[in-house]
Amino acid sequence: MALMDFIKKQFIDILQWTEDGDGTLAWRFPMAEMEIQNGASLTVRDSQMAIFVNEGTVADVFGPGMVKLTTQTLPVLTYLKNWDKLFESPFKSDVYFFSTRTQLDQKWGTPNPITIRDQEFGIVRLRAFGIYSYHLTDPKVFYQKISGTRDAYTREELEGQLRNTLVAGLTDLFGESGVPFIDMAANQDEFGKAMFAKAAPMFAEYGLALDSLVVQNVSLPEELQKILDQKIGMNMIGDMQRYTQYQVANSIPDAAKNEGGMAAMGVGLGAGVGFGQVMGQAMGAALQPTAPASAAAPMSADEVVATLEKLHGLVEKGILSQAEFDAKKAELLKKLS
């Protein structure tokens, strides 16, 4: 009877895994009461590794290649079983295959803005996102810390953990660098390298190697971006005189092509310089601490009309937009004595 039971047992002669491209990182070979025949063939492909687990303990690890499973090729497992070197009996052991292919185009990002202290803007909230790639390097560590005894473990299941790991490193990096937001946004390549150095050791703890990390965007939330745009605009207008002179100078070649154009441009140039002075003074005053309303120097009606005529001339020449003219007109009318 014992002999018949032995004959009915199923023995495994070939162990291999053909990946199907579904993002599986770890796959358990289906045993189902079957035993591995001594001398069976184990095939591990170039993009794979395999481990033998005996009674919950990782015994042997195999890289790419084809081997015959004997006591000579399973030294650790043989030691655990305390088998004789010449044993011929089949044995049972869990076999796990792992994909070592590079996992490309993995996306990371901050689900919510990160609050940091910025040298230039004070307390701000930042967003960032990009892509990264990685591959599995240590199947024993990955098995012990991540996949465990599951039949399969996929890339999608790991994605959330890796993304959170990157965002956690990003938060620390923002706080430790002391680099202003403007510099971070302008040097995304360097920022990505710093982030890579911060995150690589965290991936290694899971038996993974971080291959690349790209920062595609660093930005402020919409409401803070509007404030930044206003600040940039104020800085650009701060030297309105030079800006206006530059605009007028660019208009000279076109004016020279038209009959009477240079004569008109002579008037426009004078008006442009005058407007630049007016706007420069006005914007300079706007950037100073707010003074009491009574301290604002009133303008006479003639001065206001003269200034508006100059501004209107700039609108006709395309140097000043209608919106800018209307805004300045409203400001000047308030100064009427």
Image (cartoon, rainbow, N blue to C red):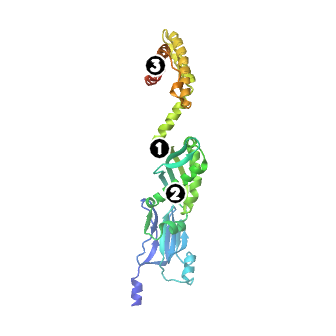
Counting from the top left corner in percent of width and height, residue 49 is at: 52, 66
Counting from the top left corner in percent of width and height, residue 98 is at: 49, 65
Q: Nearest to the eye among marks 2 and 1: give it.
A: 1
Q: Amino acid at mark 1?
A: Pro
Crowd tier of the residue under label 1, counting other residues whose Cα lies within 10 Å: few below 14, some 14–19, many 20 or above: some
Q: Which residue is mark 2?
A: 165
Which is more N-terminal, label 1 or label 2? 2
What's the distance in space between the residues labelled 3 and 2, CA to CA? Answer: 55 Å
Q: On screen, 1 above or below 323?
A: below
Give SS at disc 2: helix
Image mark for residue 221: 1
Counting from the top left corner in percent of width and height, residue 336 is at: 47, 19
Q: Nearest to the eye among marks 3 and 2: give it.
A: 3
| Residue 18 visible | no
Q: Amino acid at mark 3?
A: Val
Which is more N-terminal, label 2 or label 3? 2
Q: Which residue is mark 3?
A: 315
Identify the residue shown where x is 46% and y is 58%. 160
Crowd tier of the residue under label 3, counting other residues whose Cα lies within 10 Å: few below 14, some 14–19, many 20 or above: some
Q: Amino acid at mark 2?
A: Thr
| Residue 122 visible | yes
Give SS at disc 3: helix
What's the distance in space between the residues labelled 1 and 3, CA to CA? Answer: 35 Å
Identify the residue shown where x is 56% and y is 61%. 204
